[in-house]
Amino acid sequence: MKNIAIFASGSGSNAENIISYFNRTKSANVRLILCNKPEAKVLSRAERLHVKSVAFTKAELDDTSRISDILKEERIDYIVLAGFLLLVPPALIEEYRGRIINIHPALLPKFGGKGMYGDRVHKAVIEAGETLSGITIHHVNELFDSGDTIFQATVPVTATDTPDSLAEKVHALEYRYFPEIIEQEIQKSEAAEK
Ligand code: GRF
């Protein structure tokens, strides 16, 4: 069975949803939560769900060696970014090429890139007068939000939407699809290994 590490910086509601999904399906195992913010809610969620967690600094991420050792010790096959705000360093991308997946709360290639996260994304979508938003699940490369798209799903943006109401609709899509798409990606690569 493949092991997943989730990198998160904030609340971690997606991380919790992914952990619960794989606890039910048993098709993969969320073995580790990695977090660059010692006060982030995702760490208390990990504790409650009995998933090992590790906090690290940006310098440790950029240097890569400690993180890379932990990933090896825990025999991690896949990395999932769920609300992770730092750029993944090239050495880690190289080690996990094609096996790092991110979710972005809008329809890339629009509304992505450095600084485009959380409410800023939803505010920008509304201000641009878009009638559709949604989620983009994609492979991670050396740049923010620019790896190959794996999956997109949309929601309408209405005239009365606020960043909060749009975030709620987008979160619903994230919970609905992200775990299944991760599972499909893992199954595809397992099939290719045979
Ligand atoms: C999600 O909207 C995700 O798309 C984005 O960051 C947010 C994380 O939310 N990358 P949560 O921490 O999972 O609640």
Image (tube, rainbow, N blue to C red):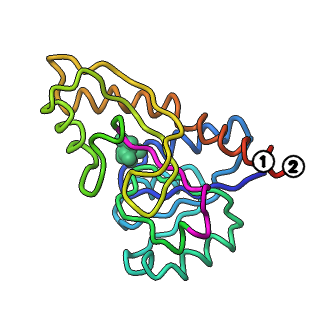
Reading the image, the residue beneath label 1 is 190
Residue 157's x, y, as percent?
Answer: 25, 21
Q: Residue at x 27, y 42 (%)?
A: 111
Residue 31's x, y, as percent?
Answer: 64, 57
Q: Nearer the viewer, residue 71 or 187?
A: 187
Tell me if residue 89 comes above or below residue 49 in the rendering.
below
Q: Residue at x 30, y 53 (%)?
A: 113
Q: Nearer the viewer, residue 25 or 92?
A: 92
Q: Tell me which corner region of the image, top left, top right, bottom left or bottom right, holds residue 88.
A: bottom left
Q: Residue furthest right?
A: 194
| Secondary element at tag 1 | helix
Residue 100's x, y, as percent?
Answer: 56, 56
Q: Are dots 2 and 1 in contact, CB under 8 Å?
A: yes
How many badges with numbers are in the image? 2
Q: CA distance from mark 2 to mark 1?
A: 7 Å
| Secondary element at tag 2 | loop
Q: Is residue 23 left or right of residue 81?
A: right
How many neighbours does mark 2 have within 10 angstroms: few (below 14), some (14-19), or many (20 or more)?
few
Numbered badge on residue 194: 2
Magenta stretch encompasses residue 118: no
Would you say the beta carbon of the disc 2 residue lies within 8 angstroms of ligand 1? no
Magenta stretch encompasses residue 95: yes
Residue 80's x, y, as percent?
Answer: 54, 52
Q: Is residue 11 left or right of residue 114?
A: right
Q: Residue at x 39, y 24 (%)?
A: 154
Q: Nearer the viewer, residue 58 or 107?
A: 107
Q: Which residues are magenta?
A: 94-105
